[in-house]
């Protein structure tokens, strides 16, 4: 049997003729392993593990591996060349892959490598994807790891069997440097605060000579002290939320009670989200509520969309998984009657699904035409128009009155960068689109019969905007950004939008946002596995804040974070 050409695969019958399934394939793989020097054996292990997609309740399968994911040193080149010569892998200009999935089952050593620590391999696989994404966005610091994700990834560095690539190590070094800088910044804030307290105390003593004037001065200084303390405490609460949510809620509540300002309110609300892992094997790219609020759809980098049954702010139940896209599912959207779901993804396709019975979804149509990945989809309120946003910097409007024969009715070209999001207002008279550059968010007038006209530009985020959604009454717009915040806007007058709140506490860019149909819950997800639910009635949410605050903050924790105030836990009784 001749060697496979570059890019050529060997089928199952070919392996049988070569003795691959009667032990010959395993002997060939073991001979390769035995022929290598020890450093090359470690590289071989790393390469073959990367060539397998880990199954979740299913068989492991082949994973095409971009050549850019491997180092270009001489040992790596030698291992690839020898494995290809022995027909274990195929090589082409851009990728490497196992010649056949039989390699996984026939080679006991490879199965043993995969079984040793599957959780560690999944962490490594996510690290690989995130490091590549970091390179794709020009090494933007917003794509780096922080907190718990960085701690998990760092464990890979200590394992000599893992073998991270040069790019992955550079990504972790940059993440570590950014986190260290954040800690230094926190220490500087503490020093500034202590200096301020000392200065205020000095001024208080100096002005105490005149009784009346001293009394007013004490009151003003106390207010200034409380305001500075509350602002610092609010920042600390937001920083702690991803890893210690119970403590973060209590510090946020202490800050809000100390100084009730929009800044401390927004910080507290940011710590009161309910979160869960919606796509354990990937990142959550998008989400949308069904019209009755009982169903939630999510799309992920694992190439699937998922349907969930919701219960208010509680953790939802999984209902169904929708597969068929040839890449990450970037967007999902329900029609107004809830009977149709649209999904768009990296394969440049939009798919329509019948979800009248959410436990038995069925695909009904596929739309094509964009020249880049489809980043967002949205139905008009009457269900006759579908808007799609793409990396090709355009927004397309489709007539889907007959879903089996969709047609393009308009193409909008007002953005200077890729268009990441699109949303209709509830009355169908306004369209919101989002991107970056000098046109982060645009509002379009759809009330006329001609081509949509631009009405307003919304500026306020410090990075690209990846998601937008209107509230059910059409008076508010939520925008999610790579600057790790969600902003709420008053768009009751679409020609004069104003910002009303900023929600923070994310460790990565925020990629999706959606209002529940009753307008009482806002769902948001960043580029990790989790989804957050926010209550949008601030008084009600703050009134129930202590339900999220367990265990009660201790004296030691209070002294570490609030050394300038007497111990007074905002929830529960004082602890040790």
Image: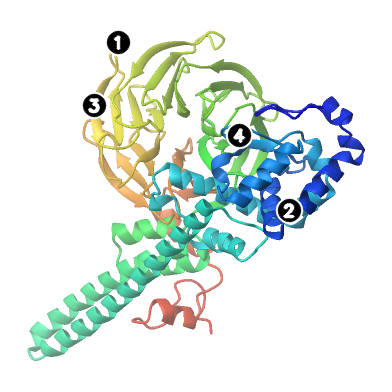
Disc nearer the start of the sequence (4/1) = 4
For the residues labelled 2 and 4, the Cα–Cα distance comes to: 36 Å
Q: Which mark is residue 402?
A: none
For the residues labelled 2 and 1, the Cα–Cα distance comes to: 71 Å
Q: Which residue is mark 4?
A: 303
Look at the image and tell me whether residue 253 can be seen: no
Q: Nearer the viewer, mark 2 or mark 4?
A: 2
For the residues labelled 4 and 1, the Cα–Cα distance comes to: 38 Å
The residue under the point 53% across, 85% down is 576
Q: Which residue is mark 2?
A: 36
Front residue of 156/437: it is 156
Look at the image and tell me whether residue 105 can be seen: yes
Q: Which residue is mark 3?
A: 455
Secondary structure beneath dot 1 equals: loop
Judge from the rendering whether residue 46 lies leftward or rightward of residue 157; answer left or right: right
Judge from the rendering whether residue 473 lies leftward or rightward of residue 246; answer left or right: left
- Looking at the rendered image, the quarter that the N terminus falls into is top right
Q: Nearer the viewer, mark 3 or mark 2?
A: 2
Q: Where's residue 192, x and y in %?
A: 26, 76
Disc nearer the start of the sequence (4/3) = 4
Q: Which residue is mark 1?
A: 449
Q: Mark 1 and mark 2 in contact (Cβ < 8 Å)?
A: no
Q: Where's residue 472, x and y in %?
A: 41, 33
For the residues labelled 3 and 2, the Cα–Cα distance comes to: 66 Å
The residue under the point 83% across, 43% down is 28
């Amino acid at each position: 049997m001749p060697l496979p050409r570059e890019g050529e695969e060997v089928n199952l019958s070919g392996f049988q003729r070569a003795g691959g399934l009667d032990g010959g394939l395993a002997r060939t793989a073991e001979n390769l392993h035995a022929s290598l020097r020890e450093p090359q054996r470690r590289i071989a292990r790393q390469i073959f593990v990367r060539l397998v997609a880990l199954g979740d309740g299913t068989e492991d399968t082949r994973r095409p591996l971009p050549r850019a994911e491997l180092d270009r040193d001489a040992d790596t080149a030698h291992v690839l060349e020898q494995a290809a010569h022995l027909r274990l892998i195929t090589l082409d200009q851009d990728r490497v892959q196992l010649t056949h999935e039989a390699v996984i089952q026939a080679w006991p050593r490879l199965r043993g490598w995969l079984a040793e620590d599957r959780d560690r391999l999944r962490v490594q696989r996510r690290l690989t994807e995130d490091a590549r994404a970091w390179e794709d966005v020009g090494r933007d610091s917003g794509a780096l790891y922080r907190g718990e994700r960085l701690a998990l990834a760092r464990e890979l560095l200590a394992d000599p069997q893992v073998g991270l690539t040069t790019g992955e190590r550079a990504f972790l070094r940059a993440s570590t440097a950014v986190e260290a800088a954040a800690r230094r910044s926190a220490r500087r804030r503490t020093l500034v605060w202590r200096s301020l307290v000392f200065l205020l105390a000095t001024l208080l003593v100096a002005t105490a000579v005149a009784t009346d004037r001293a009394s007013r001065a004490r009151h003003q200084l106390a207010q200034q002290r409380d305001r500075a303390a509350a602002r610092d405490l609010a920042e600390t609460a937001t920083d702690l939320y991803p890893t210690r949510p119970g403590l973060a809620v209590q510090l946020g509540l202490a800050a809000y009670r100390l100084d009730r300002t929009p800044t401390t309110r927004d910080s507290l609300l940011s710590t009161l989200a309910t979160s869960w892992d919606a796509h354990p094997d990937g990142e959550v790219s998008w989400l949308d509520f069904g019209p009755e609020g009982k169903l939630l759809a999510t799309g992920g980098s694992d190439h699937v969309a998922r349907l969930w049954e919701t219960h208010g702010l509680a953790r939802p139940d999984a209902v169904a998984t929708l597969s068929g896209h040839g890449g990450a599912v970037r967007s999902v959207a329900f029609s107004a009657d809830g009977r149709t779901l649209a999904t768009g993804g990296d394969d440049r396709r939009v798919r329509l699904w019948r979800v009248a019975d959410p436990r038995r979804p069925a695909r009904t149509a596929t739309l094509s035409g964009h020249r880049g990945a489809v980043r967002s989809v949205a139905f008009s309120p009457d269900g006759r128009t579908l808007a799609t946003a793409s990396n090709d910097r355009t927004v397309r409007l489709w007539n889907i009155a007959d879903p089996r024969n969709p047609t393009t009715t308009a193409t909008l070209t007002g953005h200077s960068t890729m268009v990441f999001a699109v949303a209709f207002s509830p009355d169908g008279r306004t369209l919101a689109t989002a991107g970056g550059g000098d046109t982060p968010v645009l509002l379009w007038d759809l009330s006329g019969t001609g081509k949509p006209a631009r009405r307003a530009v919304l500026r306020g985020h410090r990075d690209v905007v990846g998601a937008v959604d209107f509230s059910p009454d059409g008076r508010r717009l939520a925008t999610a950004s790579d600057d790790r915040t969600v902003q709420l806007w008053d768009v009751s007058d679409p020609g004069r939008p104003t910002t009303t709140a900023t929600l923070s506490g994310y460790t990565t860019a925020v990629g999706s946002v959606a209002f529940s149909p009753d307008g009482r819950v806002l769902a948001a997800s960043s580029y990790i596995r989790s989804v957050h639910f926010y209550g949008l009635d601030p008084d009600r949410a703050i009134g129930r804040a202590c339900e999220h605050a367990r265990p009660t903050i201790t004296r030691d924790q209070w002294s570490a974070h609030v050394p300038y105030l007497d111990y007074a836990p905002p929830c529960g009784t004082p602890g040790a």
